Image (cartoon, rainbow, N blue to C red):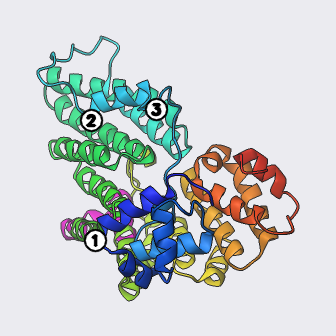
Amino acid sequence: MANDDLGRTLRRLRRLASLTQEELASRSGVSVDVIRQLEQRRKHSARLPTLHALANGLGVELTTLLGDPPAVSSTSENDGPRFVAVRRAIMPALWGPEPPPPGPEFTLDALRGQIADGWTQYHAAEFDTVMKALPDLISDARAAIAWREEPDRSSAFAALGKALQLAGHVAVRMGKTDLALTSLERAMDASQQSPDPLLPPMIVNSMAWVYQRQGRLEDALSIAVRAAAGIATAGHDATADGLKVWGALTMSAATSAARSGDYDRAAAMMERAEKEASRVSSLPEGGDNRMVSVFSPSSVRIERVRLAVQYGHPRDALALAKGMRLSKDTPPSWRTWLLLDVARAHTDLGDAAGAVKTLESLRRVAPAWTRHHTLAVAIVRDLWALPHHPPGLRALADFLGVGE
């Protein structure tokens, strides 16, 4: 893989993990000379196995090391105008004017529907569309808080929490993890004034994801475990929505444990999550699925495939993925991860034809996500370096801009 920012990202992540180059070499099995050359930009490329080993040594997702792709168009070297508008919505100007009252056509139900649509668009990688809508969603929720009486005011806090949570996720996709945490902290403040007891732990799950992206694995593990325990203690896991939030937090905790090297604890968490996921369909239905954490037998299996690939068990990953039937509510983003991980497993096993076939499936079902994933590009770059190209590789390379 060739990446002008690879050395800079590697150095930043290594320092965040408080590791010397020698310590990272020991943890990853990559020579200190290769690490030094990458960080000094004397070496601008590395094959997937090397990048995979470095990511494991750093305790981060491979895509964190590869760098997030530009999720939306930008008109300059700095943030594009739409992202500037999102930033301003998250952090309004000091001493700014009070928001005007909502118009006569405004309803909280309509606002909630628009926010749910935003989550659907996010999972479909329609980032530009989401960013265009976010400032108005956030400002409408703030206006409802300022001008409505109870119980509408409390419901408006819930809407603001979900809108700011969405903004935090978009900020992560733009590589702005500090802004993401700011947005999520404000989402948490709003959620604690809402009537929804599941909203705070859902936002905790998002914060754990951001901590993982920053290499703060202990923090991510701690808050996910605590929030999941709180759901169980309060009895909220007796409903479908509550169990979904509990399950998402438990899977997040398992991921943090695995990246910290505690594979036994991670396996135990995933085993319990898989057992509990079977109960979701038998519990009382909640509200709009688009506004609740993703958790089902399908999502647990997808996460197990991901962990198997990440920790060097590609055959296990393919066995887990074989014949998998995804539930109808599995978002496109999760389907994308599954296919990418299956493609990685085929690549790790030297099955170039299998990797290409999987990526062709990904392109058919989620072309936007395919373009947005640096992992897809990295896999195709590795395959392109092979002396013999399997059928279909050139079309994929052209689609991703990887070919000669």
Amino acid at the residue labelled 1: Ser
Between 271 and 23, which is closer to the camera in this rendering? 23
Q: Percent x, y for residue 125?
A: 55, 43
**Residue 375 seen in the current view:** yes
Tag of residue 186: none
The stretch of residues the image draws in magenta is 230-251
Amino acid at the residue labelled 3: Glu
Secondary element under disc 2, as helix, strand or loop, is helix
Give the CA separation, mark 1 to mark 2: 36 Å
Between 44 and 168, which is closer to the camera in this rendering? 44
The correct choice, above or below, for 13 with respect to 181 in the image is: below
Tag of residue 77: 3
Taking the view exactly as shown, the residue that stands out farthest to the bottom is: 264
Residue 135 quadrant: top left
Q: Which residue is mark 1?
A: 18
Whether tag 1 and tag 2 are in contact, CB under 8 A, the answer is no
Q: Residue 27 magenta-drawn?
A: no
Q: Which residue is mark 2?
A: 160
